[in-house]
Image (tube, rainbow, N blue to C red):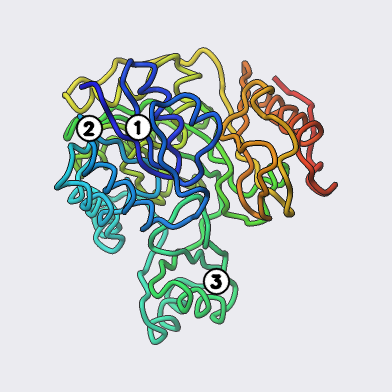
Amino acid sequence: MERILVCGLNCRPVALSAKALGFEVHVVDFFGDVDLKRNVDKLYSLGGEYDSQKLCDLAVSVTEKGSFDGVFLTSELGCNASYVKAFEPCGSILGNDSKTVAAVRDWKAFFEKLSELDIPHPKTRVVSSEGEVAGVVGEIGFPLVVKPTHGSAGFGVILAETESEVYDSLKHYGVILVQEYIQGVDASVSALGSGGAVKSLSFNRQFLGLEFLGCTLPFQYCGNMVPVKHGLASECKRITELIGSQFNLKGSFGIDFVIADKPYVIEVNPRFQDTLECVERAYGVNLVEQHLNSLEGRLPNNMEASKVCAKGILYAVSDLTVSGDLTKISDVADIYKPGTKVSNGEPVCSAFSTGSCEDEALNNLKIKVGEIQKNLLKVNQCWQSSQDTSSSC
């Protein structure tokens, strides 16, 4: 294998890891970031236009015209069975096929299977008509988590307190998921599968709705920390391996949890997780290499982390203009060129930090975010909050 294509919302981590293995790497993505363009062989971009179907159409067109040894599908594309299926006639997908993706993304069947396996999960109903709303609300009770059936990064996810909020979401998306609200720790497990056997790699914290990263929505995904400690981490890994085996998942995948009195499974991501680069930094591995090995039936031995790595995705809390060269700051990625206008609520860049423990990694991330805000971005003052740099290591 020599020439590969990476397609999706978050391509940079996969593309750079593949490039480090010596592949010729072509990419199709939304944004065309500066640091991605500088480090791959060919970049096709929608120029920031956020349209998943257009992205899929462009990527399929590039695949049909090119001669690629394999295709990696990342977030937005790799967890939607219809998008995965669009690639199957024209290239070798290096990951889960559309049938497997459909199995873990058929929400009704998936959660029924979890019940059969006695795996805890929030009560979940698929709602496609207004006539179903009252019955579902009565069954589950407020507050409710309401979300679109497809999407990523927590966009469109709300905590509903009234039936009118549920109706509004249904009217907007046509079909929605309505879930029991479980209050707890947002977490995930990163794993590798070989289509039967599964190896859990890392137990991670998910960052959702953090104000210091500019989030204004409570379920907005804004980064992660790898690895973290928790008394139920081993149980989460056991559940991940059981689900991965049951659904014959292949390659790098992850499972999202909310941990309360016990771990509750929220969803399976049957493609590279956004934790990829933090796993690589913490454990000193190339996860694309491990992914390819697992597709050939070779799973790694137990790995030990040498540090804790945190990633934060910064969002704009007002319209702003990137006013400097972010490439001059270390551990900053997903970089727009200077002068780019970023609208309120859109991602600005990603920042990374490490530490000897979770508190140190998080505090170092806050320092890094403050450096970006102070020196390179025109933002309003309300984005300068939560810069607590105390450590309890």
Q: Residue furthest bottom?
A: 131
> What's under tag 1, amino acid-wise?
His
Q: Nearer the viewer, mark 1 or mark 3?
A: 1
Residue 374 location, x and y as percent? Answer: 81, 34
Q: In the figure, residue 102 lies in which quadrant?
A: bottom left
Mark 2 or mark 3: whose residue is earlier in sequence:
2
Which residue was labeled with disc 1?
26
Which residue was labeled with disc 3?
142
- Could you tell me which secondary element the residue under label 1 belongs to? strand
> What's under tag 3, amino acid-wise?
Phe
> What's under tag 2, amino acid-wise?
Phe
Crowding at dot 3, Cα within 10 Å, few <14 / some 14-19 / many 20+, comes out as some
Which residue was labeled with disc 2?
68
- Left or right of 363: which side holds 226? left
Mark 1 or mark 2: whose residue is earlier in sequence:
1
Label 1 with label 2: CB-CB less than 8 Å: yes
- Identity of the residue drawn at 41% across and 51% down: 266
Q: Nearer the viewer, mark 2 or mark 3?
A: 2
